Amino acid sequence: MALKKPENMHYEEAIAELENIVNHLEAGDLALEDALKQFERGIALARSNNQKLQKAQQQVNILMQQDAQAPLQEFNNE
């Protein structure tokens, strides 16, 4: 099965794969070449997720600036 590109993965999906990679690397039972490939994949996943987080933070900042003077209202979940 081909691996998805990190930029095409959902944040949570990438985190789960990253946790799996960390577990494999910490177990220490991979050959050096395989460990390097896993490490490279992990770095790609971490960088992609970092970009996604930065984008989300930027969107929140923009939304907050658009109406920073609006009074807070009670949330009604109906």
Image (spheres, rainbow, N blue to C red):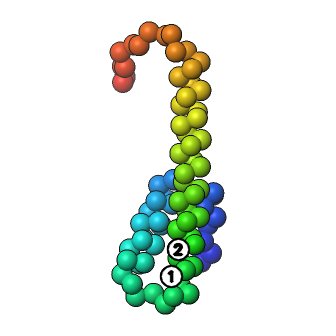
Q: Residue furthest bottom?
A: 31
Residue at (62% x, 75% y) in the render: 2
Q: Are marks 1 and 2 in contact (CB under 8 Å)?
A: yes
**Image quarter of residue 49:** bottom right
Q: Is residue 9 visible?
A: no
Circle 2: is it few (<14), some (14-19), or many (20+) Cα within 10 Å?
some
Residue type marked 1:
Ala
Q: Nearer the viewer, residue 9 or 25?
A: 25
Residue corresponding to mark 1:
35
Residue corresponding to mark 2:
39
Horizontal side of residue 9 vs 18, given as left or right: right
Residue type marked 2:
Phe
Residue 7, image x, y percentages: 63, 57
Residue 39, image x, y percentages: 52, 74
Q: Is residue 35 above or below residue 23?
A: below
Q: CA distance from mark 1 to mark 2?
A: 6 Å
Q: Is residue 56 above or below residue 51?
A: above
Residue at (51% x, 88% y) in the render: 32
